[in-house]
Amino acid sequence: MPTEHAIENAVSVFNIDSDDVKGRIIGREGRNIRALEGATGVEIIVDDTPEAIILSCFDPVRREIARLALHQLVTDGRIHPARIEEVVAKTKKSLNDEIIETGKRTCIDLGIHGLHPELLKMVGRMKFRSSYGQNLLQHSREVANLCATLASELGINPKIAKRAGLLHDIGKVPEDEPELPHALLGMKLAEKFGEKPDVCNAIGAHHDEIEMTNLISPIVQVCDSISGARPGARREIVESYIQRIKDLENLALDYKGVTKAYAIQAGRELRVMVESEKVSDQKADELSFEISQKIQTEMTYPGQVKITVIREKRAVSFAK
């Protein structure tokens, strides 16, 4: 949904206890709201929405500054242009400190050393950005850890893979927004701040916009997909995930003698119950193989799906 995507990337809602606050935020002849918009660079929409003020801006950090500043002003109760400028300046400073701290803490947690201070800042800014409902910093940390694991399995340097995994989406959080795809912008920023060619290529190639020149690049691309495709990671993936589970069950129910089919373990296993009168033990073996082949040819899914056919003989008698 383009609308949903735009709203998620451009709007924050600030909740207030009572609508009286709205008048104080607007101020006499709108002077307070003008001062707030001027100091934060965020459009502040005060309309009929009950107990809420809408903050609109494409920069998530500026939105967060406006939200925190508004919170302090409303709690404090003193709202006038000079006070607004003072609170916004303090909020900007503390949020910048938090961004740098978040970047440093993330690198310490992941064991990544020697990142340029500007790149550290970008890692910190990821905390305030989400992509399709998935927090960008969480996603990047997840990709970094997956890259290190996969690289170790393949006998490739896990430290470089982890570094590339963490930085692969930095093109989504620059201060200014040039008209470049985020992968290429990220690669340019990594080059500018002294990252190794392997790391730069992995960032630029993770959406196939340039050619891959080393083995780190496909690892980053694969791990990015894994992190985004797991069930529940992203909003619109949830609908297609539920559909895939239904399709999996319906595919098994099409076979004769099948009474029930349950997809379990997030679609990684399919349990198929069959009628013992209609399906023999040998037929049950064949059935599990046939279903696995059909799933393989007709469906797309991450990983593998285990098919378990369960045939049980029930002997029922009545004592009268």
Image (spheres, rainbow, N blue to C red):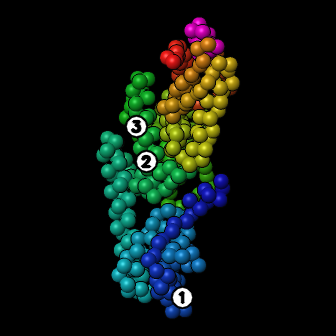
The quarter of the picture where residue 206 lies is: top right
Q: What stretch is highlighted in magenta?
A: 278-289
Query: Does label 1 or label 2 sit earlier along the sequence?
Result: 1
Work out whether 284 lies above or below 294: above
Residue 295 makes an appearance in the image: no
Residue highlighted by disc 1: 30
Work out whether 213 lies above or below 190: above
* Left or right side of 5 for 195: left
Mark 1 lies on a secondary structure that is helix
Q: Where is residue 54 in the image (x, y as percent from the top left)?
A: 54, 72
Residue type of the residue flagged with mark 2? Gln
267 and 7: which is toward the camera: 267
Q: Position of residue 246 (x, y in %)?
A: 62, 35
Residue type of the residue flagged with mark 3? Asn
Query: Does label 3 or label 1 sit earlier along the sequence?
Result: 1
The quarter of the picture where residue 127 lies is: bottom left
The Cα–Cα distance between marks 3 and 2, rounded to whole angstroms, is 11 Å
The Cα–Cα distance between marks 3 and 1, rounded to whole angstroms, is 50 Å
83 and 294: which is toward the camera: 294
How packed mark 1 is, by other alpha carbons closer than 10 Å (few <14, some 14-19, many 20 or more), is: few
Mark 3 lies on a secondary structure that is helix
Query: Does label 3 or label 2 sit earlier along the sequence?
Result: 2
Q: In the drawing, what numbered circle is on residue 138?
A: 2
How packed mark 2 is, by other alpha carbons closer than 10 Å (few <14, some 14-19, many 20 or more), is: some
Q: Residue at 52% across / 26% down in the picture?
A: 269
Q: Position of residue 15 (x, y in %)?
A: 47, 72
